[in-house]
Image (cartoon, rainbow, N blue to C red):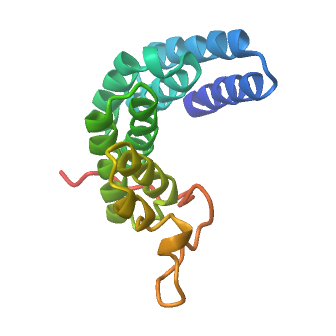
Amino acid sequence: KAMAAGSRSSAGWCWALAAGQPERARQLGADSVQRARQLGDDVLLGLSLGGYALVVGAAASGPLYAEAFTCAERSGDLFIENVLHNNAGWDALQTGDIPAARAHTEAAIQGAKALGTAHADASHTLGLVLRAEHDIGGAIGTPASPAARSPGRPQDKHGPGGSGAGRRGRRSE
């Protein structure tokens, strides 16, 4: 029941944002975080904080991601942690924090590998990080770049976004 309430709220901010209603999306995101806090569910709170970070914008997302990582680590949910690293890497890139973008993006790639899922989004972001670092050769050679794809190289079986939906891992204790 808790996940259903959080999912409805998260779906609401996604639709509001897609419909060009950023203020409505921010309000729904804040509501999602508030509900998750009341429920005390770290997975739901981590998801809600990560979603809210997406709608408040890169410049304001840092504290939200920090708390979301804490929730993901407490819950042991590697999938959520991986998604958070991917999104935090993109936001860091958008704000010009290239070292943070690299760290988060590399963590997202490693997390995806540990889960056995594709990492096309993170590889794409890593290419942009390398470009920002003026490593054009490295940027062209990232697995998500067209130049890096060849008949002998395994392709992303999950398509854009590297969706390994349903393949959630838990930290060993």
Quarter occupied by the N terminus: top right
Instruction: Note whether 53 is above or below 80 in the view shown.
Output: above
Residue 76 is at least partly visible in this image? no
Q: Residue furthest right?
A: 19
Q: Is residue 105 left or right of residue 140?
A: left
- Which residue occupies the foreground of this view, 92 or 61? 92
User: Exactly how many numbered labels are in the figure?
Assistant: 0
State the residue in front, 169 or 146.
Answer: 146
In the image, residue 130 sits, relative to residue 66, either above or below, namely below
Give the camera-side residue of 170 and 81.
81
Q: Residue at position x 33%, y 54% from top?
A: 135
Q: Is residue 167 above or below residue 150?
A: above
- Name the residue: 28% across, 35% down: 100
171 sits to left or right of 153? left
- Is 90 drawn above or below residue 79 in the view shown? above
Q: Residue furthest left?
A: 173
- Place of residue 127 in the rendered image (x, y in percent of width and height, measured from the top left): 43, 54
| Residue at the bottom extreme, as displayed | 152
Residue 159 position by quadrant = bottom right
Residue 168, how many percent across, how many down?
Answer: 44, 55
What residue is at 37 percent from the left and 41 percent from the top? 85
Choose top left, top right, bottom left or bottom right for residue 9. top right
Q: Position of residue 150 (x, y in %)?
A: 52, 84
Residue 54 spot, x, y in % from top left? 54, 26
Q: Is residue 121 left or right of residue 77?
A: right
Q: Is residue 122 left or right of residue 107?
A: right
Q: Is residue 169 visible?
A: yes
What residue is drawn where x is 38% and y is 26%? 65
